[in-house]
Image: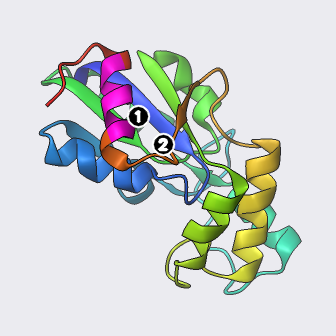
Amino acid sequence: MGIRNYLIDGVSGAGKSTVARELERRGYHVIHGDRALAYYGDPRTGEPLGEPPVDPEADELARWYGRWIWPVAKVKSLLADHSHPMTFFCGGSRNSDRFVDLFDGVFLLEVDLDTLHRRLAGRTGDDFGGTSTERALVVRVHATRDGLAKHATPIDATRPVDRVVDEILALCGANRS
């Protein structure tokens, strides 16, 4: 979708959606990966797996978390479309290792544990991290970085969103807006 394409990753509650909205507000092209691309599937084959059970136990939830993927062919197709100067893909994908090297840059939004707990406490059951089982999984992923993009540029996402986006844009070589 862009001449230059960037991936913005992070644990649930790190601020991916908030950063996406601020980039859009500033006029940048954004793909909300968790809404527009993600589904539950086999990370190796891409085969859809349906939906996880309602209120799964912790181990089952962790297995489903590892199956939250983006369709590789569609991501490659979007990356090949150069109709925008820059496109930001914001969201998490447990199969990002299959396409992460195709991005011009990858950013990992990082927050401390207290900030993460505070942000997740404000979520409802409709947002991932809204239940105690989901929050425990997010905290585990925060500690292990399991499933997050590797070799990404860390971004301190505890700051106000305008400063976070300013840093991302500066690292992308974009003018401040």
The number of numbered badges drawn on the structure is 2
Which of 110/12 is in front?
110
| x and y, in percent, of residue 123 in the image | 52, 78
Classed neighbour count for the residue bearing mark 2: other residues with Cα under 10 Å, few (<14), some (14–19), many (≥20): many
Amino acid type of the residue that numbered disc 1 sits on in the rendered structure:
Val
SS type, badge 1: helix
Q: Which residue is mark 2?
A: 71
- Indicate the quadrant containing the C terminus: top left, top right, bottom left or bottom right: top left
The residue wearing badge 1 is: 75
Figure coloring: rainbow
Quadrant in the picture for residue 165: top left
Q: Nearer the viewer, residue 173 or 45?
A: 173
Q: Please give the name of the residue rendered at 71% of the width and 56% of the height, measured from the top-left corner.
A: 113
Kindly identify the residue that appears in the image at 52 percent across and 78 percent down.
122
- Cα distance, mark 1 to mark 2? 6 Å
- Does residue 1 appear in the picture of this structure? no
* Residue 148 horizontal side relative to residue 102, left or right: right
Asked if 97 appears above or below 31 in the picture, the reply is above
The reply to whether the C-beta atoms of the residues labelled 1 and 2 are less than 8 Å apart is yes
Residue positioned 63% across, 39% down in the render: 95
Amino acid of disc 2: Pro
Q: Which residues are magenta?
A: 163-170
Answer left or right for 48 relative to 32: right
Judge from the rendering whether residue 164 lies leftward or rightward of residue 47; answer left or right.
left
Q: Position of residue 114 (x, y in %)?
A: 68, 61
Looking at the picture, how far across and down is residue 41, in whole percent?
Answer: 62, 55
Per the picture, the main secondary structure of the magenta-coloured stretch is helix
Relative depth, front residue between 83 and 29: 29
Is residue 132 toward the left or the right of residue 2 in the image? right
